[in-house]
Structure formats: C-alpha cells, structure tokens
Image (spheres, rainbow, N blue to C red):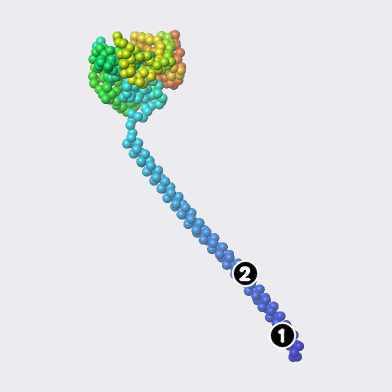
Amino acid sequence: MDYNERNDWDERYRKWKEEKDRKKRQEEARNDESKRAKIIEFIKKEEEKVERVVGKEVKDIEKEVRLHKGVVIGIGIFLILIILGVIIYVNYDPSKIRYQYIDIEVRNASGLPMNVYYKERSLFSLSGWESMLKQGNQSDRLYGNEQYRKIIFDDKGKAYTYIRLEDQIRLEPLTMDPGKVTRIGWFSSQSDVRIEDNIRKEYKKTSVSLGFDNVEINYLIPKKENYFKVMIKADNYTDFSLGFVLNGYDIYLPNGSILINDHQNVDLNKQVDLIVVGNLTENEKDFLKNKVGSEDKKSKAIQLNGTSTSFDDTDYEIFVKNDSAIIVFSEMPTRFENLFKWNVFRIGVDQGNNAYLVILDNANLTYSEDKLDWIINDRYFNGSANDYIDLVLNKMGEIE
C-alpha cells in the first residue's frame, strides 16, 4: 500500500469514526433526554402524591382547627350566658319589671304617687295626696306633707307661716300649734311607708302600708288583663275616696251625658304676688317678704280654671281622651267627685267595697237609648258598659 492510499484510508476511517461518535453521542443524548423526561414525570407524580397527602393533612388540620375554634367559641358563649344569668339573678327585682298588661308603680315620694302603666305606657296616676279619708267628723288627705306651710320669723321673733298658691305666696301670723299648721294629711312620713309586690302565676298584688292605724291600699292586677282592683283597708273609717289624676279626659255618664273637660292653665305673665296678712308696717312686711325662699319668689303666677261636679249613687264613669278610655266603678253605685280645675277625680269606696278600673283598648263608644247604657266595642269586649262591669266583677271573684 502506497503512501497516498494509506492517507485516503485514514481519512475515511477518521470520518467513519467521527460519524460513529456523533451517532453515539446523539443516542446518548436521546437516552439522557428520555431519562430526564422519566425523571420529570416521576417528580411530577411524586409531587402529586405529596400534594394529595399534604392536602389531606391540611384539610384534616383545618377541620380540627375549625372544630377546636367552634368548641372554644361555644365554651365562651356558654360562660358569657352563665355570667349574665348570675348578674340577672343577683339583680332581679320583680317590682321593677313591667307586669303585663297593666302594672302599678308606687313611689315613696311626696304625695305618694301610684303610676298606672298599660303595655308599658304611663296612662295616669292614682294619688295618696288626692285621696281623702274621713274618720268620725274629720276629713283630710290620705297622704299629705309635713311642710305644707313653712315657718319664718320676723325681727322680733314672732312666727309667721307662708304657703305658695297659684298666683301668690301668702304670709300669715302663726296662731296655733306649729305641728298642726305646717302638716297636712293623715299620713306624711315617708319612713313609715312600706311597699311590697307579690307576684304569682296568675296575678300581681301590690300592698302599700302607711305604717300605723292599720291603713293599707292594696292592688290586685290579673296577668294579661285590662283591669285591676283597688282595695282599702283602714280601721274605723267613715268614708274613703280614691283620688286619681287624668289630664285632658272627658267624662261619659251612665245617662248618656258627656262632661267636657274645660281645664285651663292660664299664664299670668308675672311672678307670684307676696301678700302679708296682718296689721304691719311696710318695713315689717318687707322684712318678712325677704325671708321667703328665692325659688318660691321666682315662681310664675298662673290661674287654673275648670268646672267641678259631684254625683251620688252612680254606677260608673267612663273617662275618655281620643282613643283612650277608662271605666271606673265599685261593686255598688257610689259617689264621684270631678274637679276639672285640677284634673283630679275621686270615687267613693265604702267599707266592704272596692274600686275597679278597666282600661279600654281602641274603644268605640255609642249610647243606646234602648238599653240606656253606653255600648263599648274594643279589643276585649263588645257590649254594654254594665255587662262589661259584671264580666270584670265575675272574673276578679275567680282569682281571689
């Protein structure tokens, strides 16, 4: 083999070797790519497995967290309810919770006001101040005031009393026992008053004791009814008149007549006059006037107007104002006193009898000439006033 042939063979061998190496590298590259693809596929599958496992674990954890969170919240709410229950139990006072539908709130205050509520709305007030008690020949307010008149002294030590009226302050020489002059009413000491509420399943009873002489006012209030009874207890009383204040109510009488409330409160556009009774010099009068309290002297003068009527042996009176109405009666025909000047009204309660008050709800009243009675149509009843009264008396008799 000559030199040229050998070189040609070497060149061919070299090219073959390069081609073979190239194909080998391509094959190896293909194999590597396949391996990478398999690895990637394996990794993806493993990732999916991990995600499934981790996802399940996460969901289980979230579920457990939610469960624990719900348990914690439930325990918290339970503890709060227990705390609130303890607070309510410790502070529970039945006398301060409005009774349904009628409730009476007696306040140990000046005049002994007894506010009447219907469906939590204050309608009117019964009053110890406006109630009158007669024992023997002496009649006075049931519950009065120890300082109805005030006592002052002049520069010589002489005692005078003064009282504030509608349009004047009146000063007069003291001529009798100061205790009898300054005090008014059978009872006036707030420290002697006892108020007790007794709540049963079907009714509430409120007792007001005035401290001595065995005098009590008791209220019997059936649950979820529109009426109540007032019972008077007193030893050896001659007459008792239960007083109440109703602003702006007209009065419907059993004979079909209507008494229009003509109450007027006229502002006289001035302060009250200071009037001194007695034969005194102007300097002496001025000295006494200066003794009057500044708040009393600043009072505005007014003039109250209104008619007064009274009736004996009357079955009932119906007090009407817009869509509000109240029937007032006793077991037997009794006396009524109507003082529009002060919007004060009284019903006589003889021994052995009681006073009853029925609150009408959205009542329509028409007078029947056939029955000679008022026909009442309200939420609770449709019929004559006397039939309504009989119904209430029968129902009240069932719960006593």
Position above or below: 141 against 73: above
Residue that appears at 34% across and 27% down? 202
- Which of the labelled discs sits on residue 25, or is there none? none
Q: Earlier in the sequence, mark 1 or mark 2?
A: 1
Residue that appears at 41% across and 9% down? 255
Q: Quadrant of residue 383?
A: top left
Instruction: Kindly report the distance in space between the C-alpha atoms of the residues bearing marks 1 and 2.
Output: 34 Å
Furthest residue in direction front, as rendered = 283
Circle 2: residue type: Glu
- Which of the labelled discs sits on residue 33, or is there none? 2
Q: Is residue 222 visible?
A: no
Residue that appears at 43% across and 21% down? 361
Furthest residue in direction bottom, as rendered = 1
Q: Quadrant of residue 178?
A: top left
Few, some or many residues within 10 Å of mark 2 (<14, 14–19, 20+)? few
Q: Position of residue 60 (x, y in %)?
A: 46, 54
Q: Secondary structure at mark 2?
A: helix
Position above or below: 212 against 58: above
Q: Is residue 322 left or right of residue 173?
A: right
Q: Give 375 or 84, whichever is nearer the viewer.
A: 84
Q: Secondary structure at mark 1?
A: helix
Few, some or many residues within 10 Å of mark 1 (<14, 14–19, 20+)? few
Q: Position of residue 14 (x, y in %)?
A: 70, 82
**Which residue carries the number 1 mark?**
10
Q: Give 194 or 45, whichever is nearer the viewer.
A: 194
Circle 1: residue type: Asp
Q: Position of residue 350 (x, y in %)?
A: 29, 13
